[in-house]
Amino acid sequence: MTERAAIRSSFSRAATRYASAAGLQRVVCDRLLELLPDRSARLVLDLGCGTGFASTGLHERFPEAMQCAVDFSLGMLRVHEQGDRSARICADAHRLPLASASADVLFSSLMLQWCDLPVALAECRRVLRGGGHMCFSTVLHGTLAEIDEAFAGLDAHRHTVSFPAIEVLAAALTDSGFAVDLMRSETHVEYFTDARALLQSNRDIGASHVPDGARRALLGRAALRQVCNRLEARREELGVPLTYQLAWVVARASSGDRN
């Protein structure tokens, strides 16, 4: 199984429990909807749509536009919120089955971190018309730091995705033919009743698969107990913390032909 296929499988398995587990994802998505540009649109893409958190907001903002909900997890698309009028496309952000310069607005909340950033941004730029907008949220370096530190020294594997620094993200946008109109970053901390609930939450939203250098065998009981003890040692009044470094971005596709 390829890495992209493994990520797809992880999200498909999480599809039925994703909506109830993804509280932070809803909040981030709602804030991104508030940043949508004041413009008309004929075609709007919701890339990495998941179970459809953005659907209602996008239809309200662009009532006359054709809307396409795109996700590479068929499981997510199958449980997409009922009553949605969007066309649904099962496709990978690395290779979209859409014509070049066909979309006016591309909306994507907490999806890009699962992609090869230059590849996905180049594909997003390809499908956008010159002057079109890409509005997205993502996570940055420092996200899930508590999990990284809890596993440190126990094995030689990665246990979280390698997230980009904000400077790397900005440079990748420029290199892909985007002009950044807005970029906001913020630290958000989630709290859990205990260490096992923290780890389970990461699995429930399909985010526990690590593309590069991941451990394939189960962690032993003694090692898992040590991970939980390290997480519990960070306990605060509100619970066991897990940190997210979040970014919201509005970028414009350059008018030059890059196709």
Image: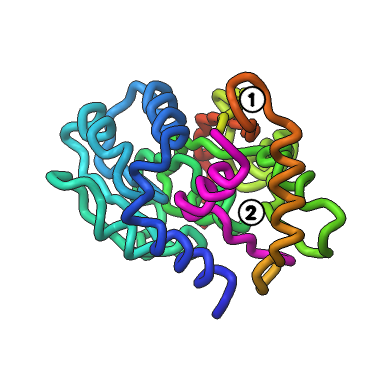
Q: Is residue 85 visible?
A: no
Most extreme residue toward the left is 83
Q: Position of residue 175 (x, y in %)?
A: 67, 46
Q: Identity of the amino acid at label 2? A: Pro
Q: Which residue is mark 1?
A: 187
The residue shown at (54%, 43%) is 197
Badge 1 density bin: few <14, some 14–19, many ≥20, Cα 10 Å: few
Q: Is residue 24 visible?
A: yes
Q: Identity of the amino acid at label 1? A: Thr
Quarter of the image where one finds residue 191: top right
Magenta residues?
193-214
Q: Position of residue 189 (x, y in %)?
A: 60, 27
Q: Is residue 164 left or right of residue 99?
A: right
Q: Which residue is mark 2?
A: 118
Quarter of the image where one finds residue 62: top left
Q: Of residues 36 and 38, which is closer to you in this image?
A: 36
Q: Is residue 250 left or right of residue 100?
A: right
